[in-house]
Image (cartoon, helix red, strand yellow):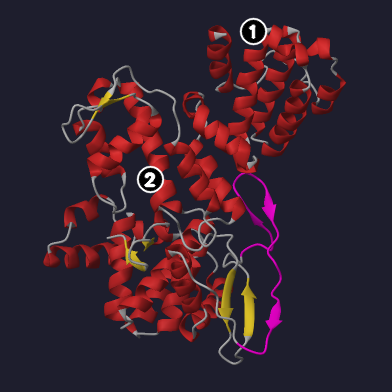
Amino acid sequence: MEDFYKEFIEEMERSPLPDGRAVLPIDEIDDFSNEDFLKLETVNDIKNLLLQTRFNNDMGDGSEIFLKLNKRLSGLANLKDNQGVKNKYDIILNYLIWFTFPLRSEKEVRKIMEEELLFGIKINVDIYEKIRQRLYLYANDIGNLSERRLMTETLRNNTEELGKNNLVSQEGRNIVRKQTIKNWLSDYDNFTNNDKEKGGVERLNYINNNINTRGLDKDQQNILLEILKIYDFLRYVPVIPSAYQEMYAVRPEGAGVLVKREAEERVNDTQTIKNGFEIEPEKQVMIKSTSRIEPKIETPEEILAAKFQEFMGTDLAQKALDKSEELAKQLGTDLKKIRNSFYTAVNNQDKTVALATMFVLAENKQIRRVFSEDERFINFWSSYLEKAGLEAEAFKNDPAGEKHLARFFKYILEKRLKLDEVKAVMLGMALSNLARGAGEREYQNMVYGDLETGEFEWNV
């Protein structure tokens, strides 16, 4: 069992079938007899098929393999009598669940995150990215947070053990708990001791300075860091709305007319998630009623979503979005033209063109390229930061860093374009969302929604 496990992990990191052997067609899984499934030859054929599927990063094939294999094995009564073969199939099925995590059922998600989280990390599945893909697929960043709640709950219920030593209480009382994942998360919450958003600094501080983490070796500390990163992401990092979230606004010219807007990525008619699954954007529809529909707002997420949706329906936002479509055709991806359009508009305090240009460079995935090598920007902003006593040296090391640009955009919107703080941060949220949708994810958190206050905040 242990040999197969190690071999499986090693082979998942290599190119498939270096000796050129043919791969088992997926449909032939249905043709195996019950006796065939008990043969090691069959186990190896299925493993090789999985190697090929992983190499191709084909989640659709992976899901089909899982469904076929799980169905056949669940009906194999005598599999329990051959524990060695059963254990190998368990490893294959668990890997398939992680590989196709965005597509799995709630029951399967609950089981794998409560019982096989360490397995997923050890076999080098990017669990953080799989979770993000699932949220994208379900458009579950705001409003109905059932997916986030499900995954957070399963982490807090995970009883897998990490490390050899029991955990002692942070309060100094003589309380000892098992070193389970759920107890590590509780220990982390107690150590940080606040409800504010936590990031890499807080996690490293916990790993380096907590009495319990000192008992972990380096590999175990890295595993715990990865788990904490996932945990904090699920609790604190909703980007509102999701790139694939349906957006709604009320048209000012007609009370009682609810307009369903397409998501703001307009480069392609079909929006593609990284895993290869395509989501067809819904066509704009009109829903008329005799009175304006007032949605019932109950949760902090819904409050944030409603505020953002209302702002995106304002004349300021709509004119900027419309203008960005026009500018996208005029400017293309020419960095010089985009920079000149932006600076000229800012100097003339032309809000519509300035905002539209910002949207264009975000949609073009060009934020870093536009600012990282722009001497005008670097000289101006470096001088400003030095005079203000704000991280000038850190800025020089990475002029296009997320927090530096967040502070710069905040300055441009509030001081140069004379927008109030609320409008400025809303536009920063729109820019963050467009950057994420275009794939420039380092800028997706320039603005975030604070679930505690119900307000949007700059990440500066």
Most common secondary structure along the magenta stretch? loop
SS at badge 1: helix
Q: Which amino acid does label 2 sit on?
A: Asp
Q: Which amino acid does label 1 sit on?
A: Gly
Classify mark 1: residues with Cα within 10 Å, few (<14), some (14-19) or many (20+): some
**Label number found at residue 232:** 2
Q: Name the image quarter holding the N terminus.
A: top right
SS at badge 2: helix
In the image shown, does 383 or 179 lie closer to the viewer? 179
Give x and y (percent) for residue 145: 52, 55
Give x and y (percent) for residue 82: 69, 7
**Residue assigned mark 1:** 84
Q: Is residue 276 magenta?
A: yes
- What residue lies at 63% left-to-right and 79% top-to-bottom? 259
In the image shown, does 429 or 209 lie closer to the viewer? 209
Q: From which residue to which does the magenta span run?
A: 267-291
